[in-house]
Image: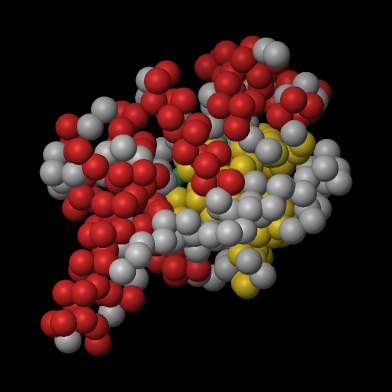
Amino acid sequence: MPVDTTPAAGVAPAPRLENAEHLPGAAKADPILVADDVTRSFGGIKAVDVAHLEIPRHAITALIGPNGAGKTTLFNLLTGFDKAESGRWTFDGQPADKLSAARAARAGMVRTFQLTKALNRMTVLENMRLGATGQQGERFATALVPALWRRREQEITDKAMTLLERFKLDAKKDDYAGSLSGGQRKLLEMARALMTDPRMLMLDEPMAGVNPALKQSLLGHIKQLRDEGMTVLFIEHDMHMVRHVSDWVVVMSEGRIVAEGPAHTVMHEQAVVDAYLGAHHDTDLGADALLED
Ligand code: ATP
């Protein structure tokens, strides 16, 4: 059976962002995700306080901001890994704020984690096969019919191998994930996330700990996915990546969205410079990089 690894095969319109205002909460022509009044506090501090956010479909959006701005918490809320105190959001037109993490993934919103969760003592292929968990093949009725189960198992393996070839990890299929380099793990995370055919891929710091050669490869893969119709939302501190890959940038500071726009303009906005300069010392370096041309 042919394996389709292109989540929205044949649909790859250019991102229609030219008419979007360069303002926090800007409306997009065709948002895949729309969120309103999303809040989450920890010990009295509002980690997330997002009034309105629209993520454009078929585009690469970077979510940036200094350490502690609330980016990962927002990811956790949107993907069902944490519970918002208030707020509503839709994914692809359907309410998504009550979904568990598993249901959010099945709805098409799949994320990777800052610290890669690839299980070290499992092989690369086993990690990939695990990415298919929760799909139809794991349903009770299918599991009871051996022929159906075997066919499903084979489909999962075929799909895993196709994705591993795409990410040039096929030669490592029998290696333990723990033996991979940091960059290869990021590729594995991305490949594994694609096992469920997501419509939106959410990457938490995909470039952290990746060497320059693999960074280029990762950038290429992300653009390629977008060109095939995928929506990508990624959190990143690496401003080189943000500048080179994003169609749109959303900036968070102290839980709120403080700026939005294309990378080349948003990085010079006063609210963004202030957010970085007012932040922890570590991210001053980020601000320097932010202002590089
Ligand atoms: P970074 O870029 O450093 O990863 P971030 O923008 O992703 O930061 P978050 O990790 O979302 O920021 O954190 C936002 C705020 O919420 C921070 O003040 C953080 O300390 C706090 N926070 C996040 N998760 C928890 C938690 N489980 N318990 C308590 N406080 C938390």
Above or below: residue 37 compared with residue 284: below
Seen from the viewer's position, the closer of residues 279 and 133 is 133
Q: Residue sitting at 31 percent across and 29 percent down?
A: 182
Left or right: residue 221 compared with residue 267: left
Q: Where is residue 266 in the image (x, y as percent from the top left)?
A: 76, 29
How many marks overall?
A: 0
Q: Nearer the viewer, residue 224 or 275?
A: 224
Figure check: 29 above or below 112: below
- Left or right: 117 as drawn, with respect to 175: right
Q: Observer-nearest residue: 135 or 23?
A: 135
Q: Where is residue 166 in the image (x, y as percent from the top left)?
A: 36, 44
- Residue at x 58%, y 21% (from the top left corner): 240
Residue 82 is at least partly visible in this image: no
Residue at figure coordinates x 24%, y 87% from the top left: 141
Quarter occupied by residue 211: top left
> Quarter holding the N terminus?
bottom left
Residue 156 in view? yes
> 100 above or below 12?
below
Q: What colouring method underlies this structural image?
A: secondary structure
x, y (%) of residue 97? 58, 66
Q: Position of residue 130 (x, y in %)?
A: 25, 58
- The quadrant of the picture occupied by the C terminus is top right
**Relative horizontal placement of residue 218, taking residue 44 as reference (left or right):** left
Residue drawn at (50%, 51%) of the image = 201
Vertical order, 71 against 105 (above or below): above
